[in-house]
Amino acid sequence: MLAKVADFYEEEVDNAVDGLSSLMEPLIMAFLGVIIGTLVIAMYLPIFKMGQVVRSPERCYHGQGSDQSPPQGSRGYDRNAVTDFAG
């Protein structure tokens, strides 16, 4: 008699666990997608910003025959300040 009751409740628990796991699976996948997407964006955003700074002509002030000066508070690239350590 107790074996039948144990089998019945074991089957009930297995069904409940299967139902909960099938409900949680898409939520876990969405959560992992958001976390991984955030990490990818956090890694690539500085690279894209660096590319924009390198290509941006208004950030480059050469000082050689140029009458442009950097705007107040700007951290423009100063070619004269770069030192060549190779030679």
Image (cartoon, rainbow, N blue to C red):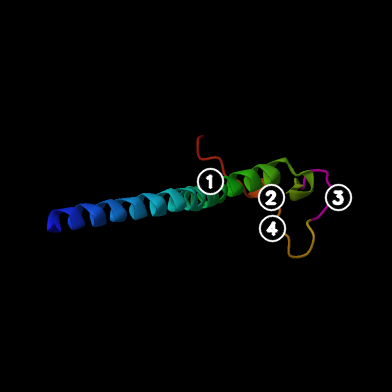
Magenta highlight range: 63-69
The amino acid on which the numbered mark 4 sits, given as a three-letter code, is Arg
Tag nearer the camera, 2 or 1: 1
Q: Which residue is disc 1 drawn over? A: 40
The amino acid marked with disc number 2 is Tyr
Measuring from the top left, give residue 17's x and y in whole percent: 34, 53
* Dot 1 amino acid type: Val
Disc 2 marks which residue?
77
The quadrant holding residue 3 is: bottom left
What is the magenta segment's predominant secondary structure?
loop
Q: Earlier in the sequence, mark 3 or mark 2?
A: 3
Q: Which of these two is toward me, 61 or 39?
A: 39
Distance from label 3 to label 4 (Cα)? Answer: 17 Å
Give SS at disc 3: loop
> Label 3, on which residue?
67
Label 3: how many residues lie within 10 Å, few (<14), some (14-19) or many (20+)?
few
Residue at screen point 43% across, 48% down:
22
Residue name at image x 48 percent, y 47 percent: 29
